[in-house]
Image (cartoon, rainbow, N blue to C red):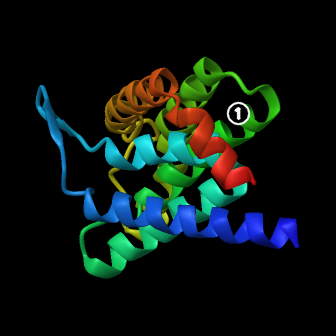
Amino acid sequence: MKTQHTNTKKLAAAGLMAAVAVACSPFSIPVGASRCFPVQHMVNVLAAVFLGPWYGVGMAFVTSLIRNIMGTGSLLAFPGSMCGALLCGLVFSRTGKLWLTYGAEIFGTGILGGLAAWPVAVWIMGNKEAALFAYVLPFLVSTVGGTAIACAVIAVLKRSGGFAVMKEAVDR
């Protein structure tokens, strides 16, 4: 029964994180000639730490799906968010080290997600002009911003004692 109760809590938390990511997805920060959309990446890190890799990937998929259905997202959100969520979730579940988790989100979304977006752009979206590394830099800009925000949120939670409370509440 404990496992089912824990799974229900994690599913509810993943749903809340997806809702936050969808609701806050229009938020952006101008960075030079580009724009940084950090919320999905912040939520990826929080899901990795509090929920684990599989709930994180599910949350990233649901967020991308809802944003696409609403017309506020792009098909490129699927590979970017899901690669980052999976990698940082796996890294945190194996090591428990936050700094490695932050790096995994940046590498997973920025590099792997950016490269995985190329076939989506070329074969599904019909953008025959896209270069292989075309999406790496924009994905890196957003994921670095989101990871920095997640780092700050987690630091505040740790300092206030909220980190342990949230971790135990989800795992209990």
- Considering depth in this image, is 2 or 150 the residue closer to the camera? 2
Image x and y of residue 19, in percent: 38, 67
Q: Is residue 100 above or below residue 15?
A: above
Q: Is residue 33 above or below residue 45?
A: above
Viewport quadrant of the C terminus: bottom right
Image x and y of residue 52, in percent: 70, 48
Q: Residue at x 69, y 72 (%)?
A: 8
Q: Is residue 95 left or right of residue 36?
A: right
- Considering depth in this image, is 91 or 120 the residue closer to the camera? 91
Q: Is residue 123 left or right of residue 85?
A: left
Q: Residue furthest bottom?
A: 69
Residue 160 seen in the figure: yes
Dot 1: element = helix
Viewport quadrant of the N terminus: bottom right
- Considering depth in this image, is 80 or 20 the residue closer to the camera? 20
Q: Residue at x 50, y 70 (%)?
A: 62
Q: Is residue 100 left or right of residue 124?
A: right
Classify mark 1: residues with Cα within 10 Å, few (<14), some (14-19) or many (20+). Answer: many
Q: Residue at x 74, y 40 (%)?
A: 90
Residue 122 seen in the figure: no
Image x and y of residue 158, in percent: 52, 25
- Considering depth in this image, is 118 or 88 the residue closer to the camera? 88
Q: Residue furthest right?
A: 1
The residue at which mark 1 appears reads as 92
Which residue type does callout 1 highlight? Phe
Image x and y of residue 163, in percent: 55, 34
Q: Residue at x 42, y 33 (%)?
A: 150
Where residue 147 sits, quadrant-wise, is top left
